[in-house]
Amino acid sequence: MRAIRSKSSLRCDHGQRRQRIVESLLAEVFLGRLKAGQHLVTQELAERFGVSHTPVREALISLAGIGVVDLLPNRGAVVRSITPRGAREICQVRRALECEAVRRACGRIDPADLRAISTEIRGLVAARRPFPGRVVEKARSLDSRLHDLIAGSCGNAFLASELERLKILFRAFRDAAWEHDGALNGFARVAEEAREHLAIVDALSEGDRRQASRVMSRHILAGARYWSRVLRGGARTSAAPENGHGKLNGRNPSR
């Protein structure tokens, strides 16, 4: 007899399908494989990902909510232009949110958790280049863990929820930039980011709010410069057509 799956399990699978679609489309936009002004057709995406229309529609709504596509009446989803300026403006928002989160997280995180993640980050700092794939995956995992730990420990539910909502956008930028960097520089950013993360963990361990905010700010600014350089090379190929729609630069003429 077939086992009956729980509603929570079904919801989890549905959420994972939606997440996979969002992540895949974000990566393609940031890498220039999906161009500004390009229409995203629900039926085509459903066939491509092997899902029903529902998770595709939900994924497109999520992408619209973070400003990557426009949902236009009678026209569906249209990709917006991603520019270096747009990346900088996203990072300005991220900097404000994450600096406040790390400042508030000081003294709220279990020291044992900080010691454990510090040890793992030090292993990345000491790793030899060129980095094998497993080291890059470890760096990606540690980056996500550290930022999630800070957000979850900030003591402000609204701030944590905003970081949760936007983190898929931040991490899509990160992954696209790392893919670009891996082809050119052997993942040089991985080592730089590990040192920045270590400075953040050290400040958290010392309970130094001012220093934690300062090093987080440097970390976000370094990422902004990096993301902008990566996007600059693809800005020409992702520029909006003459009858295109709003760029991801803080102004959306369709609103």
Image: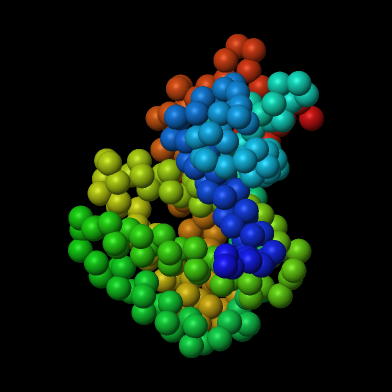
Apparent side of residue 241 relative to residue 33 in the rendered image (left or right): right
Figure quadrant of residue 181: top left
Residue nearer the viewer, 250 or 212: 250
Percent across and percent down for residue 237 are: 45, 22
- Identified at 46% across, 22% down, the residue is 236
Q: Quadrant of the C terminus?
A: top right
Q: Residue 30 location, x and y as percent?
A: 48, 37
Residue positioned most to the front = 1
Classify 219 as above or below 150. Answer: above
Give me the residue at 36% from left, 65% from top.
Answer: 138
| Residue at position x 23%, y 58% in the image | 132
Q: Say above or below: 136 vs 246.
A: below
How far across and down, in percent of the image, does residue 177 sit?
Answer: 41, 44
Q: Where residue 238 appears, x then y in whole percent?
A: 50, 25
Q: In the visual, does 92 lie left or right of 201?
A: right
Q: Is residue 66 above or below residue 69?
A: below
Toward the top, the furthest residue is: 242
**Is residue 243 depicted above or below 168 in this figure?**
above
Is 254 left or right of 22, judged from the image as shown? right
**Does any portion of residue 184 appear in the rendered image?**
yes
Q: Quadrant of the N terminus?
A: bottom right
Q: How is the image coloured?
A: rainbow
79 or 198, which is in the foreground? Answer: 79
Q: Is residue 91 visible?
A: no
Q: Determine the residue positioned at 63% across, 31% down.
A: 42
Q: Nearer the viewer, residue 144 or 156?
A: 144
